[in-house]
Amino acid sequence: PITRNYEVELSQITLAPDGFTKTIFAINGQYPGTVIHANKGDRIQVTVRNNIGEPSVIHWHGMFQRGTNWYDGVSGQTQCPIPNGSSFVYDFSTQEQRGTFWYHAHTHGQYMEGIRAPLIIHDPNDPYRKDYDFEYIITMSDWYHQRVSDMLAIRMSPNYGGRNPIPDSGLISGAGRYNCSAAPPGSECRENNPLAEYKVTPGKKYRLRLINTSGLTHFMFSIDNHPLKIIEADGEYSKPVIVNKLPVAIGQRYSVIIDANQKVDNYWMRATIDDRCLLINNQTVNFDSAINYNVTGILKYDGAGSGYPISTEYPDQLEPCLSIDPNLLKTLEPQQIPGPVTNKIQLVVTFRDDDQNVTRAFINNSSFAVDDNHPTLEKFVSDDVPLDQFPANQNIYAYDQLGGVIDIAYINNNSAIHPIHMHGHNFYVLGTGSGIVVDESKLNLVDPFPRDTFVVNSTSWSVFRYKADNPGVWSIHCHIEWHVEMGMIAQLVELPTELSKLTIPESVSNLCKQQDNSKRSKF
Ligand code: C2O
Ligand code: CU
């Protein structure tokens, strides 16, 4: 196989993606960061040089990391973080995977400060290749003007009450627009910041790879006058489905094909933030009228004038905060649904104050507390700590039958909405429904679609199924980064017998030895 080598340098720069200048964490001096491209089957080697002033790690969202759990990039779970001033090489194979992915920091909210970028695995045998002429990558993200570390300190302080910071703006592919009259005095802010522009040639077809890389925000994506033909979700081909608007939850990816068959003109591309989703996830919100929830970019036909579009939005009213109906998507090739089930894991999520009056998230009554310098994988494999001796706040769930079939019933016993993401696998979304008791009669055991990120609604359940064939410590967590910091993570220890036979590469173990001399982040 071909090896794709990339360098990723993490550093602090000042930038104004929405017109407002702030210090951000950049990848190779830019935001959005360097796109990593590979073909299906390639090996990817990324040298990460950390210069942000605090330890960091990089996770490859959606990559299975079969046989390379130690390169999954989760601080305190699969590795010690990379100290400031050090480098570390991630080295993994794309194996059978293809599609749209992304990579991001996986520690202490850092990705919301800018450490997030697309990872695209091209398919030399793409079954849809004849259906489009060109492709574009479009990221959607929320954007905060305060430093993430400052917000986290406030967020996790006693009596704060569990509210999430509301983003100042939204970005399409790193560009947005802030109303500078709302900027605090003394700040640097540029009005009418340029928007992202995508040029199309009349008569051509375009594959758009959509990625929601937010910390809090769900987006509704659409392009005026241009229906979207879905062909991929989270790295899995789907049969074509045509929609006018597409809800994209944090962590989810889609490929859609659009046809540039409209009148030569400019058209709005929309990534709309629905305040109802923010409200649900925050309980109490003071709406800041300066926030522009109508995040836009421009689809520009060759030959169109330079003015702003005058196109109008599709009238479709969709449930604003959820995933697309899982039963709308069908895999392109029929799939064998694994069964019978060997392990059922129930994860019940609640929020409440801990004994320090800090509002935290609990999974089965235990709130995850990260131990950055003593990762689970290291403790279990190298130090032989038996799994039953890990403290309760490590939220460990183990299953040891090779080829076993796992059903995770994710029960959301609170009013917030959670985009649940699992590492190391795609899971079949068997079903979802309201209430906190799984209704087995609602499960689709015939043709469910596999994803790696799925939204569990307020006071609702979802059931996810996958096969235990990938030894590792795999994180399952809400992808709202504020909820992660509140402890909404569990660790799935898959096939501990197989896992304990593996040897962690020295470069990974060495990171833990370097920690003592490096500056640790406060959280
Ligand atoms: Cu996109 Cu655990 O992450
Ligand atoms: Cu959540």
Image (cartoon, rainbow, N blue to C red):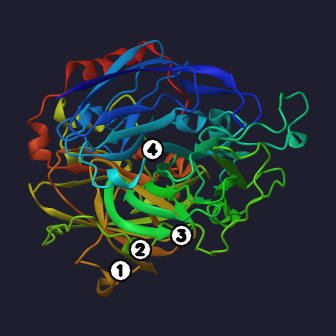
Q: Amino acid at mark 2?
A: Trp
- Residue 185, image x, y percentages: 91, 32
Name the residue that disc number 3 marks: 414
Give the Cα separation between the discs numbered 1 and 3.
Answer: 15 Å
- The answer to whether 338 appears left or right of 454 in the picture is left
In the figure, 433 relative to 204: above or below?
below
Q: Amino acid at mark 1?
A: Val
Q: Are marks 1 and 2 in contact (CB under 8 Å)?
A: yes
User: Which of the two residues, 422 or 121, is positioned nearer the viewer here?
Assistant: 121
Name the residue that disc number 4 marks: 134
Q: Residue at x 51, y 20 (%)?
A: 28
Q: Residues within 10 Å of mark 4 (few under 14, many from 20)?
A: few
First in sequence: mark 2 or mark 4?
4
Q: Residue at x 55, y 55 (%)?
A: 260
- The answer to whether 20 appears left or right of 507 in the picture is right
Q: Amino acid at mark 4?
A: Phe
Secondary structure, mark 1, is loop
First in sequence: mark 4 or mark 1?
4
